[in-house]
Image (tube, rainbow, N blue to C red):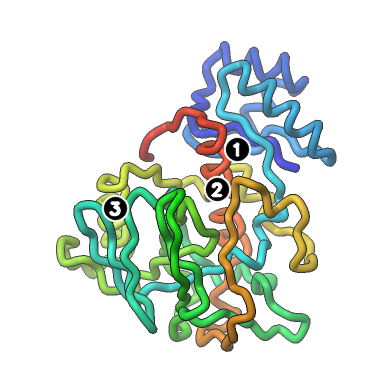
């Protein structure tokens, strides 16, 4: 179990003093593990009850703290979907998949994780079988996104394989479902309001900032500095993840729907970024369920 301190941490002396007193760590260790403005791992504990107790003590000291099961980073239900395009409306967004289009209320969005997918960091595709093949449900089997308390349909998508060894990406996470919409700017139709640019990273950032402002979302850009990224490579485990499927996390309803092979090969999976993105999203989901204050957009 990971004990996290949230983005409202600012490394002030009173905060450092409180962390030393509660965790027993030295100031040097705390400065090494925690980064202001980022989700960071302050302790790793084997027992769930002990981790939750420490998180509760830290919350009493004013920290955004929570306990998180690291197996979430390899949860096969948290699949990645590549939309072909997105249009931003006043109160919703239109998510275009290969088989259909989804209208998603902005209130159903949870957070955005901005980073880079590096093929060189591949260790194994999430949810793959021992043979190395990847089974990804078609868009007709994916549960639709809806605001908390509303019902949804189902769909899913996949895209052609990329050629580059790395590409900028932005993961859009939702409050009510576990699948992730990943924007790959190399093959993505941006909204008309986003100015054309030969620099894909800059254009992706324009889109991310526009979406975050409209939906009042926090954007996480801390992959390269957060200690959470060092806890993303989990051992291979069965689809039953135990504590990973918690009451505050609603999984997509895949049921007995037929699945198809993904047209994106396993090389597009980056276990570090994929796992980090899932952990950040679950931390945001837990924070929301605990009614912890949000830090705002970064």
Q: Residue at x 56, y 32 (%)?
A: 290
Of labels 2 and 3, earlier in sequence is 3
Of labels 3 and 1, earlier in sequence is 1
* Disc 2, SS: helix
* Disc 3, SS: helix
Q: Residues within 10 Å of mark 3 (few under 14, many from 20)?
A: many
Q: Residue at x 49, y 68 (%)?
A: 143
Q: Residue at x 73, y 80 (%)?
A: 129
- The residue tagged 3 is 211
Looking at the image, is mark 2 or mark 1 nearer the viewer? 2
44 or 82, nearer to the observer? 82
Q: Quadrant of the C terminus?
A: top left
Q: Residue at x 56, y 18 (%)?
A: 62
Q: Position of residue 275 (x, y in %)?
A: 61, 58
Q: CA distance from mark 2 to mark 3?
A: 18 Å
Q: Which mark is residue 152?
A: none
Q: Is residue 282 left or right of residue 42?
A: left
Q: Quadrant of the N terminus?
A: top right
Looking at the image, is mark 3 or mark 1 nearer the viewer? 3
Relative to 85, say whether 75 is above or below: above
Q: Position of residue 68 (x, y in %)?
A: 68, 43
Q: Quadrant of residue 168?
A: bottom left
Relative to 224, say whether 51 is above or below: above
Q: CA distance from mark 3 to mark 1?
A: 25 Å
* Disc 1, SS: strand
Q: Position of residue 51 (x, y in %)?
A: 76, 34
Relative to 2, say whether 204 is above or below: below
Q: Is residue 267 left or right of residue 88?
A: right
Q: CA distance from mark 2 to mark 1?
A: 10 Å
- The residue tagged 1 is 40
Q: Is residue 19 left or right of residue 183?
A: right
Q: Which mark is residue 280?
A: 2
């Amino acid at each position: 179990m990971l004990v996290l301190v949230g983005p409202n941490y600012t490394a002030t002396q009173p905060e450092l003093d409180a962390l030393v007193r509660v965790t027993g760590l030295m100031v040097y260790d705390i400065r090494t593990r925690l980064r202001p403005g980022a989700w960071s791992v302050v302790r790793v504990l084997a027992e769930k009850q002990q981790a939750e107790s420490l998180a509760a003590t830290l919350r009493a000291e004013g920290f955004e703290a929570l306990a998180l099961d690291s197996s979430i980073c390899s949860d096969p239900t948290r699949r990645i979907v590549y939309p072909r395009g997105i249009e931003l409306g006043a109160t919703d967004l239109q998510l275009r998949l290969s088989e259909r289009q989804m209208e998603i209320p902005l209130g159903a969005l949870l957070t955005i994780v901005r980073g880079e997918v590096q093929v060189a960091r591949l260790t194994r595709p999430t949810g793959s079988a021992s043979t190395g093949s990847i089974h990804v449900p078609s868009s007709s089997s994916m549960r639709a996104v809806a605001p908390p308390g509303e019902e949804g349909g189902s769909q899913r998508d996949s895209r052609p394989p990329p050629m580059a060894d790395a590409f900028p990406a932005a993961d859009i996470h939702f409050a009510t479902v576990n699948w992730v919409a990943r924007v790959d700017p190399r093959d993505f139709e941006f909204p008309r309001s986003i100015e054309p640019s030969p620099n894909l990273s800059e254009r992706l950032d324009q889109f991310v900032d526009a979406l975050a402002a409209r939906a009042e979302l926090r954007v996480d850009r801390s992959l390269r500095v957060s200690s959470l990224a060092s806890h993303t490579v989990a051992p291979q485990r069965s689809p039953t993840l135990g504590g990973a499927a918690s009451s505050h996390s609603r999984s997509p309803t895949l049921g007995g729907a037929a699945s198809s092979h993904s047209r994106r090969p396993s090389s597009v999976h980056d276990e570090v970024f994929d796992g980090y993105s899932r952990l950040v999203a679950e931390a945001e989901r837990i924070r929301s369920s605990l009614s912890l204050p949000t830090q705002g957009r970064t």
